[in-house]
Image: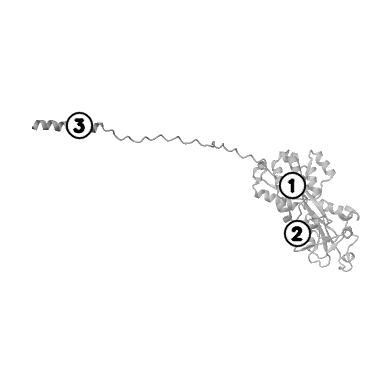
Amino acid sequence: MTKTVRSLLFVFVMASLVLAACGSPTAEAPVVEPTTAPAEPTTAPAEPTAAPAEDPMAMYAPDAVSGDIITAGSSTVFPVTERMAELFQQEGYTGNVTVDSIGTGAGFERFCVAGESDISNASRAIKDSEVEQCKAIGREPLEFRVATDALAVVVSAENDFATNLTIEQLGQIYSGEITTWDQVDPSFPAETIQIYSPGADSGTFDYFVEAVMEEHGGEEALLAREGAQYSEDDNVLVQGVVGSPYAIGYFGYAYYVENTDTLKALNIEGIEPNQENVDNGTYPLARPLFIYSTAEIMQEKPQVAAFIYFYLTNLEDNIVDIGYFPAPAAEFDQAMKNWETGVGK
């Protein structure tokens, strides 16, 4: 084979190889199917939460009201109103609460005649004549029962002979039918009984006249009792009784509780003045305690409405500690209804 022929053959073979290489199929890339779209959420987006309902009592919160409050009346109710005023201010009230201890009768005169006070403190229910006086100056009293008091008949802790008196004996002592302790009981000392009593403006005086003095000359006999000492200030009475083992006095149970180290409470008709005997109705000298206001005052002075609401709703936590007893549930419920009436609810 000639050199020329061999060269042509080589060219032919190389061309064939190139053509074969160009014609062979290339490997196909795997086909990737598109992924499906993310699933839509199955739950709808949460609706915006509603704004909390406005508290209808927020306007009566201690820190939501301003302006001063004037209260006056019973020395027996005084410790309750004073405590509530202190707590009311501790809770944010920035005004002044005046609490004057001038006696129930004088308190109603200031409330119903002079029209100077916003709240009248009373150790008895308001009289019809006092209601008429209130109406004469455009005031319609609203009553709020706040507690029950057990009237305490007390002697000095140094008195080691007297422990019990009957209602009859009390009436005799305070009318002057009995003047010495041995006339109560021959075993007692033949010493003059020293008499202490609230004054005639006091609801405690009124109650004592009604409960004890009816068969013994009433109010006139009590006021005419020779040697008797009278005061609208129960602390003065406490000090008087403490000063002698032969003295006797009476006032609201709270004042006895504050002075148990120097005073002794007598049983009456054999019944001890305590929570159980007040609740079961056996203690004969138990009585209701009140405060009074009017719808007009409560609506014109929101601070008064706020204070009365605070007063009523905080009694349960404080009344026993003050020295009194809770009002019956039905009476408390009525007081709350009267408050709602007062504010127009």
Question: Taking 105 as reference, is 237 above or below it?
Answer: below
Q: Residue at x 17, y 33 (%)?
A: 14
State the image coordinates of residue 251 (x, y, percent, origin top left). Answer: 80, 56
Mark 1 crowdedness (10 Å alpha carbons): few <14, some 14-19, many ≥20:
many
x then y, percent, for residue 199: 82, 53
Q: SS class of the residue under badge 3?
A: helix
Residue that label 1 marks? 71
Q: CA distance from mark 1 to mark 2?
A: 24 Å
**Which residue is under mark 3?**
16
* Location of mark 2 (residue): 257
Density class for disc 3 (Cα within 10 Å; few <14, some 14-19, many ≥20) is few
Q: Answer whether residue 107 is visible to the viewer in this image.
A: yes
Going 22% across and 31% down the picture, which residue do you hit? 19
Q: Is residue 302 left or right of residue 132?
A: left
The part of the image, by quadrant, that contains residue 192 is: bottom right
Q: Are marks 1 and 2 in contact (CB under 8 Å)?
A: no
Structural distance between the alpha carbons of marks 2 and 3? 128 Å
Of 19 and 36, nearer the camera is 19
Asked if residue 92 lies left or right of residue 266, the reply is left
Of residues 258 and 51, the one drawn nearer to the viewer in this rendering: 51
Q: Earlier in the sequence, mark 2 or mark 3?
A: 3
Of all residues, the one furthest to the front in this rendering is 1
Residue type, label 1:
Thr
**Mark 1 or mark 3, which is nearer the start of the sequence?**
3
Element carrying mark 1:
strand
Looking at the rendered structure, the kind of residue marked 2 is: Val
Which marked residue is nearer to the observer: mark 2 or mark 3? 3
CA distance for labels 3 and 1: 125 Å
